[in-house]
Image (cartoon, rainbow, N blue to C red):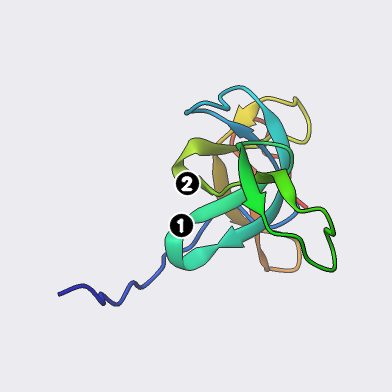
Amino acid sequence: MGNKIIIPGKLKIRTGDLVKIIAGDSKGQQGKVLQVIIAKNRAIVEGVNLVSKHTKPNAANPNGGIIKKEAALHISNLMLVDPKSGKATRVGRKANAEGKLVRVAKISGEEIK
């Protein structure tokens, strides 16, 4: 069984975006997206959803021990923050002056950089 071929769709969240968590243990927190895992529809957000990881001593961490690390969140639990109002918003796509498709915030109509 297993080994399904997953064809990922178009994700509305990219690395570097400011997002708000709308569900789960970290609900209400905001942070910058550090990484998007397209195949799993997940994203890692800075300072959010921290988990304790036990590490062996190595060159980078000579003592080992327990470190706090960000874990991935599902994309559906994230919402982009509107650059104008600072509220959570849905994302649309519109052609700009040069005819290129850009992401826009549904609340303000502001382009998302």
| Quarter assignment of residue 79 | top right
Which residue is disc 1 drawn over?
A: 41
Name which residue lies at 78% across and 66% down.
Answer: 58
Tag of residue 74: 2
How far across and how far down the image is residue 102, in percent?
66, 59
Residue at the far left in the pictured view:
1
Q: Residues within 10 Å of mark 2 (few under 14, many from 20)?
A: some
Residue 83 quadrant? top right
Q: Secondary structure at mark 1?
A: loop
- Quadrant assignment, res 84: top right
- The reply to whether discs 2 and 1 touch (Cβ–Cβ < 8 Å) is yes
Please state which amino acid type lies under the numbered disc 2.
His
Amino acid of disc 1 = Asn
Of labels 2 and 1, earlier in sequence is: 1
User: Who's the residue at 55% across and 62% down the image?
Assistant: 37
- The total of numbered circles placed on residues is 2
Secondary structure at badge 2 equals strand
Residue at 36 percent across and 73 percent down: it is 7
Q: Is residue 113 visible?
A: yes
Query: Whole-percent x and y of residue 32?
Result: 74, 44
The residue drawn where x is 62% and y is 47% is: 53
* Residue 17 visible in this rendered orientation of the protein: no
Horizontal side of residue 84 vs 1, given as left or right:
right
Mark 1 Cα shell of 10 Å, populated few (<14), some (14-19), many (≥20):
some
Q: In this picture, is 58 found above or below 66?
A: below
Horizontal arrangement in the rendering, residue 6 relative to residue 39 (left or right): left
Instruction: Judge left or right: residue 96 versus residue 92.
Output: right
Q: Give the image location of residue 2, x and y in percent.
A: 21, 72
Q: CA distance from mark 2 to mark 1?
A: 6 Å
Up the image or down, 3 lies above or below 101; here it is: below
- Disc number at residue 97? none
Image location (x, y in percent) of residue 44 = 63, 50
